[in-house]
Image (tube, helix red, strand yellow):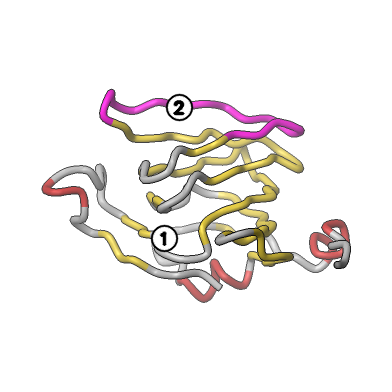
Amino acid sequence: MQGHDIAAALRVLPELAIEARTSEEQANAAMEIVAPFNDCMVGVVRFSGQTPWERHPQDELLYVLDGEVAVTVLGDEGRSEASIAKGSLFIVPAGRWHRQLPSPSVTLLFITSAQGTSHSHAEDPRVDGGERGAVSEPRS
């Protein structure tokens, strides 16, 4: 057993400025995976700019360490949005497409599936069978 120093991870974590041309390698470099947790991973990330759509096979926990972020979730009932401020958490339900837009930047602690994450740059990834523009990528 061991403790995990989140503050130390954040001291060396660069801020990712997300743009349309941001690569997977750049995104991964701005994330620090600090521990495994069941079939998930615990990590931290600091970014500005809107993320692409993503979805996971399990629920995802987002905890705002600094800043504020709007989380948009697509579901059967339509599109919903929540503004999450420092010190608050949000649970994204399993299998739901979601994206995040910080104001202006955010630092998150997340717990998410270690496998099976899908990403999409489509306007609405649920259209045409839900996979148009989607790429499935495990993060490590």
Residue at 45% across / 70% down in the picture? Answer: 138
The residue where tag 2 is placed is: 81
The image quadrant where one finds the N terminus is: bottom right
Residue 115 location, x and y as percent?
46, 66
* Helix, strand or loop status at disc 2: strand
Q: Three-letter amino acid code at disc 2? A: Glu
What stretch of residues is rendered in magenta?
76-90
Residue 88 location, x and y as percent?
70, 31
Residue 46 location, x and y as percent?
67, 55
* Helix, strand or loop status at disc 1: loop
On residue 20, the disc is none
For the residue pair 38 and 24, the one nearer the viewer reads as 38
The image quadrant where one finds the C terminus is: bottom right
Lower position in the chain sequence, tag 2 or tag 1: 2
Q: Nearer the viewer, mark 2 or mark 1?
A: 1
Residue 29 location, x and y as percent?
62, 72
Distance from the alpha carbon under mark 2 to that under mark 1: 21 Å
Quarter assignment of residue 99: top left
